[in-house]
């Protein structure tokens, strides 16, 4: 995913679901999924029945693309989730939700997850006042995410935060719009994740 150079809207059409890769465009009628809910290409309109391995692969690809991860990164996350107690699928989703780039997008501090990754690698954010420039960093309970002092005064970043004040924020995160910071209240539960995915198919795929 990190080396993908084509139109990201093709990925959404390929999965037949919005992956929210283009920020606010995905919320408008300009989104290609709204107009052409079928895979791109010459044979996109053909009905193809997908069973077994194909279903498992599509769920994995959909989840991987949604969070903007490479195959290697995604597999590492799965292996870490598999070693933890509890239901592997639920644990995997919880870990993916806790990625720093995902949290920054969810709380409205960036246009999209790819934009969040760019801001993180450029050093615009602090976690508990420590510089973190790794998008895959996993936030923990009680962590506070905030812009560094210079970035908090940047007019473009302030405008992004201001435009997202009406955004629906997950219950496991608390946002202080005035201070431009977010606090992790608890780990996200399965019901907090509204993206349509059947994670058990991903587990079945990697368990073969």
Image: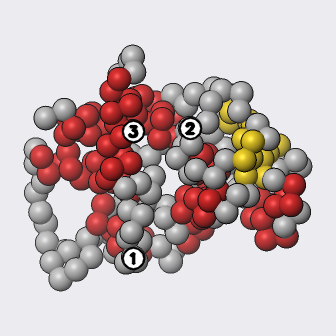
Q: Which of 13 and 183 lies nearest the eye of the viewer?
A: 183
Q: Where residue 96 sits in the image (x, y, percent)? A: 47, 41
* Residue drawn at point x = 87 percent, y = 47 percent: 179
Q: Residue 31: x and y, percent?
A: 47, 73
* Mark 2 nearby-residue class (10 Å; few <14, some 14–19, many ≥20): some
Q: What residue is drawn where x is 72% and y is 47%? A: 131
**Residue denoted by label 2:** 138
Residue ID for mark 1:
5
Sequence-wise, the earlier of marks 3 and 2 is: 3
The image quarter in which residue 204 lies: top left
Say whether disc 1 or disc 2 marks the residue closer to the N-terminus: 1
- Would you name the residue on which mark 3 appears? 77
Whether residue 145 sits left or right of residue 41 in the image: it is right
Q: Residue at x 38, y 31 (%)?
A: 80
Look at the image and tell me in which quarter the N terminus lies.
Answer: bottom left
x and y percent of residue 177 in the render? 83, 49
Q: Residue at x 61, y 36 (%)?
A: 139
């Amino acid at each position: 995913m990190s080396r993908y150079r084509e139109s990201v809207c093709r990925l959404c059409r390929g999965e037949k679901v919005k992956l929210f890769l283009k920020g606010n465009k995905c919320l408008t009628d300009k989104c290609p999924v709204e107009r052409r809910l079928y895979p791109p290409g010459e044979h996109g309109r053909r009905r193809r029945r997908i069973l077994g391995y194909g279903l498992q692969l599509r769920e994995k690809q959909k989840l991987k693309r949604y969070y903007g991860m490479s195959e290697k990164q995604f597999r590492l996350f799965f292996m870490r989730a598999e070693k933890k107690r509890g239901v592997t699928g639920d644990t995997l989703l919880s870990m993916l939700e806790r990625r720093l780039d995902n949290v920054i997008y969810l709380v409205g501090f960036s246009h999209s997850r790819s934009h969040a990754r760019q801001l993180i690698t450029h050093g615009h954010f602090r976690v508990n006042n420590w510089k973190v420039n790794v998008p895959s960093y996993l936030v923990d309970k009680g962590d506070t995410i905030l812009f560094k002092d210079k970035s908090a005064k940047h007019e473009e970043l302030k405008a992004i935060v201001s435009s997202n004040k009406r955004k629906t924020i997950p219950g496991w995160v608390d946002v202080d719009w005035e201070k431009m910071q977010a606090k992790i209240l608890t780990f996200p539960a399965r019901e907090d994740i509204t993206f349509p995915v059947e994670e058990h198919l991903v587990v079945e795929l990697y368990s073969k």
